[in-house]
Every structure is written in C-alpha cells, then in structure tokens.
Image: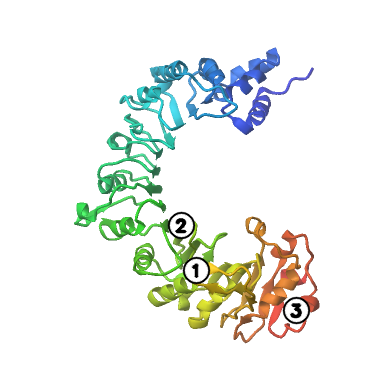
Amino acid sequence: MIQLPTELFIDIFSLACAADTYDIERKLHLAQVCVYWRAVALTYPTFWSQIRIRTSRDATFLNVALAHSRDSALDIELSWQPRRDDTILSDAQKHAVVEALRAPAQRSRLRCLCVDYVNVPPNALRLLLGAGLEFPALEDLAITGKYCKQPFLEPHLQAQCLRRLSLSQVDFTSWDTLIASSLEHVCLDDVVVGESAKLLTTILRRCAALRHLEWDVSSSFLMSTSSEVIRDALAPHLDTLRLGQTILAADILRFLNHSVNMDPIQNIEASIYNGDRVDDETLEFLQEIIFRMGRLVDLSVEETDQQVVLRDDVGRIRRLIVWNEDSTWDIPSLWSALSTYYSIDTSLLSLRMRTVDWNGFAGAFSKRPPSALTEVYITVTGDLKYYTIDGESWHPDAESRPPRTLIIPNLRRIVFLHNADAAIWDVSDLPVAVRVRDILQYVECEAATRVEVCISDAVRARGEGISEHETLLAGLSGKWILCHHCACA
C-alpha cells in the first residue's frame, strides 16, 4: 500500500477537522484508525494545540491533548454554556481543567484564551483569571459573559504581550495590568469601570500599536475629568472606532475631537437612538462624527434604512446607525441637515440607495438637488410607490401615490444592483427590465449627453437575460444608453 507523505496527511487531517478545529475527540478518532495515522498525528504537535473544553468528555481528554501538543503555543476555548445536547462539566471537572491550565508549563505557552459562560461565572475561573497570574505568551484574551448578574467576574492577570483584548459583562475596575502597550485590538462591551475617561485616555496613551477600538461602556463619561487638552500624540495608528448603543456617542466623540491630540480616525461607527427627526441631539451627533472630515463625496444607505454611510474625499468613513428598532433615518431631514451644515448637496459624487428609498431621496432632492452627483447605484428591491401617512401610523388600506421624480441635474451613470439579503422582502414578479424602465421615467437630469445605464448585476442575479437596447429603452433612448458591457452581452 502506498503511503502518502506525512505533510500531505496532516493537511488532510486538518481539513477533516476544519468544521471544528477545537474538537479533541475528532482528532483522537483520526489517530486511532491505524498505526500509520497515529504516527502522523503524533508527529505534529500543532495539530493538538487548539483545544475546546465544553463537555465532560472534553475535560477527560484535556491532558491527552496537552501532552500531544508538547511545546506548541496553545489556543484554548472554555465554552461553559448550557446546551441541550451537552453533558455540562461538574464543578470538580471545571476546577481540574483550571488547575491543568494554571500549571506553569501550560500557562507559559498559552497564546489564545477565549472564555464564555452564562448567568454566573464559575468559581474556578477566578482561580485562573482573577488570581494575578502571569501569562507571558498570551496574545489574545476574550472573556464573554451572557445574561450575567453582578458581581461580574473581575479579571486580574498580567499579560505583557497581549495584542487582542475583548471583554463583555465583566468587572474591569482593576484594568491597569491588562492595558498592555502591545494591544492592537480592544473591545469593551458592558463592562464595569470606575473612571471611564481615565481608562479611555490610558488606552489611547499607552497602546501605541492600537488599530481597532470598540467602546460600549455604560458608566458616566464626564468631560470635566479632562478639562485640559492632552498634548501627547495618542494612538497614532488607530484606524477603526466603534461606539456602542449604551453610551452617548457625541460625548465620547467630543472628548476625542477636542480634549486629546489625535489624527482623524479613518473609520468611525456610532449610534443614535432615533433618526426619524433631526433635532438638537441629532445635530450634535452629526457635528462630532463629521468633525475634521473632508468634502463628503459618497453616501450609502445600507441593507436597512437604519444605517447611513458617509465617505469623504480622502477615504474616511463614518457609519451612522439608528439602534431603535422602531425608528429609521428620515432621509429628507438628514439630507437637509447635511446640506445646510456640510454642503453635501454641492460635494456628493456617488450615491448608493435602494428602490424603497426612492421617495425619501426624491423629496430631499426636490429642495436641495445634488449638483455634483454623477453616479447612482440602486438596489432593486420593492417598488417606487408610497402610501399615505396619518401621524406616525401607516394606513394599510390606503391607495398608493405615484412615485416622485428624482432630480439629479448632472447624472452621468446609473447602475442597478441585486442584493440577496434585501431580495427576500421583494415580492414583485416583474422582470428587472420592466422595473428599470419604470424607474428611468422618474429620473430628471440635465445631462447634455445620454446617461449610461447598467443592469447586468440586477438581471443576472435573478436569472434573467439582458434585454436588447431597443426593448429596454424603447421611447427613452434619447436620454439613456446601455453601458458597453450590457450592450455587448
């Protein structure tokens, strides 16, 4: 019998375990098929270094996996959540697992540790994460509590090589030893802290390599704690900032904009409760999130109308999210504010929208047309008609009104797209070509040359063919022309 090279065999083993690389029992089954397979599996200690402890059987096999992994860096998952099909670890087994990982021989090579639990953190975890132990090789630490009641788990450990830190529902009052200078990615979600401004400032000052920060700390953020501008250059490589729902994003952004010395952040994502009206709170939110941006050249409405994305002329991106499920962005009001205070009506070059956003943008553009806008990308989902509104309640039996006209004076190109996620809500049986013809009749532009139309993405995603120019644009060809790609299809 011809034997495959061990390098190829271990790749096959890895593929066999690809669906769950942390499953110890599956690896043991592969190693027990025959003598040669066992020899191959035991030759590669890295094959055994990814370990998850969730069930009683996992706990039983832990020492076997640790022995086979030899001196390899360890990636450990402790997933201690109740599951219907699992035999949950007893307290004695949890303590045995923790004692094995606490041993200097294992702790010194622990590179990644991910812990998740529900309701109450197991007491055994405090022996591992709350006893001030040193983890010299730890680069990635994630602790996730779900549906927990205080007191939360309070991590207290030393990890000077830490690069990624993700904490959710923990007591982070004693945070100093975990804010390592090597951190590149920090995510804090619903953690308990004392002085949140001090923690944030320490992260920005100490973590020179920081590139990604997610901040959802509900404790009060008092600007008075940092009344003077911090002159040190902070977090010079910070690329992405995500602010959660439980905070006032404008407060954090104001602190970063005016109280610390930082370069403009490339990507910022922030949330506001309501978007159905532009009030003083919304204007304050816009003022801080758009602070120090260049000319706004791209606007995109995401799959839901609760997210609007802005991009400026140097590539900075701002994602504006409405997190109240019963509220959405009111496009006309938002456009009016962005036009009045940030001149987006004279700077916007590209717009991405959905057909269901049509009348919102049509109403907005009727008062402040986008004079520089040349390209529009439209995801075909739903029709252009809209219904009468009484206060804030829809009239389900009301007759629909005809679509409004979308005014884009200098339009040069219009592209129709398909989105699989949005398509599940699209109940129309009309072919895309028919819907495109309907849409084009409600676009008003002043272009001296015909406007290019691209429909290939929208039609092919639905399994339709591209109509001939004469069929698609019959009676409209004086204003529109198929793009070269569609015309040659």
Q: Position of residue 483 (x, y in %)?
A: 70, 73
Label 1 is placed on what type of residue?
Glu
Q: Is residue 441 left or right of residue 370?
A: right
Residue drawn at point x = 62 percent, y = 69 percent: 355
Label 2 CA crowd tier, 10 Å (few <14, some 14–19, many 20+): some
Label 2 vs label 3: CA separation? 42 Å
Quadrant location of the C terminus in the rendered image: bottom right
Instruction: Give how far across and how far down residue 100 sits, in percent.
Output: 44, 17
- In the picture of the structure, the residue carrying the numbered disc 3 is 473
**202 relative to 385 in the view: left or right:** left
Residue bearing mark 2: 324
Callout 2: SS = loop
Q: In terms of sequence position, does the residue under pointer 3 or pointer 1 come before the other?
A: 1
The answer to whether residue 86 is above or below residue 452 is above
Residue nearest the viewer, comparing 474 with 192: 192
Pick the front one: 439 or 47: 439
Residue 164 in view: no
Q: Do the numbered discs 2 and 3 sit on residues whose CB atoms are within 8 Å?
A: no
Q: Eyeballing the image, is 226 above or below 53?
A: below
Q: Evaluate whether residue 353 shows in this view.
A: yes
What is the distance, in whole Å, between disc 3 and disc 1 at their CAs? Answer: 39 Å
Residue at disc 1, secondary structure: loop
The amino acid on which the numbered mark 2 sits, given as a three-letter code, is Asn
